[in-house]
Image (spheres, grey):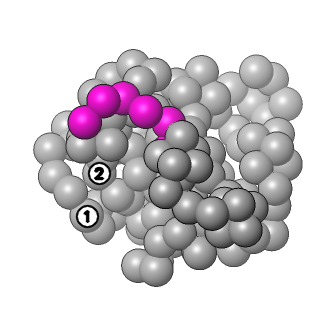
Amino acid sequence: MTNMRMSEILSAVLGQTERERLAIATLAPKDTGLPMAVYLTTRDTDHQGARVKVSRSHGRKLNLDRLVSVSISDDPRVVDGFGLLHQDLRLVRAWILLNRDVLLRYWNHGLSTADMMAALRPLGRPRGRR
């Protein structure tokens, strides 16, 4: 599969009304402080529980064939996929714990994508400094 944005795939598959109610964000390493891209959806797009999807590959490109799902919880765990390096999982867990409330509010449609992006705290940087 080619590297495409999920929004491009959804635009090709879904009708306008369905697209409008979905919230999707792809975060680059500069947005999160993680070495890999992160893919966020809301509850309507994933019926398996609050989670983020992270690329197993480092860098800003998101390859949809190489994603691992990690729960948004007090004890983040891999819930789907395999192959995430132990040190990468440690970083992802720390980032989820740092941003758990923001991520859950986004998951539950309590924040717009823009508001979620403004509220996220990248690893290693205090809130408000990008």
Magenta: predominant secondary structure element? loop
- Residue at numbered disc 2: 68
Q: In terms of depth relative to the viewer, which is nearer, 38 or 119?
A: 38
Please indicate, yes or no, whether residue 107 appears anywhere in the rendered image: no
Occupied quadrant, residue 28: top right
Vertical order, 96 against 31 (above or below): below
Q: In terms of depth relative to the viewer, which is nearer, 43 or 121?
A: 43
44 vs 1, left or right, is right
Residue at 36% across / 29% down in the picture?
3
Q: Residues within 10 Å of mark 2 (few under 14, many from 20)?
A: many
- Residue at numbered disc 1: 80
Vertical order, 92 against 57 (above or below): below
Residue at 52% across / 25% down in the picture?
29
Occupied quadrant, residue 100: bottom right
81 vs 88, left or right, is left
Residue 120 rendering spot, x and y as whole percentages: 72, 43
**Which quarter of the image is occupied by the C terminus?**
top right
Q: Are marks 1 and 2 in contact (CB under 8 Å)?
A: yes
Spatial separation of the CA atoms under disc 1 and disc 2:
6 Å
64 vs 21, left or right, is left
The magenta region covers 1-6
- Amino acid under label 2? Val
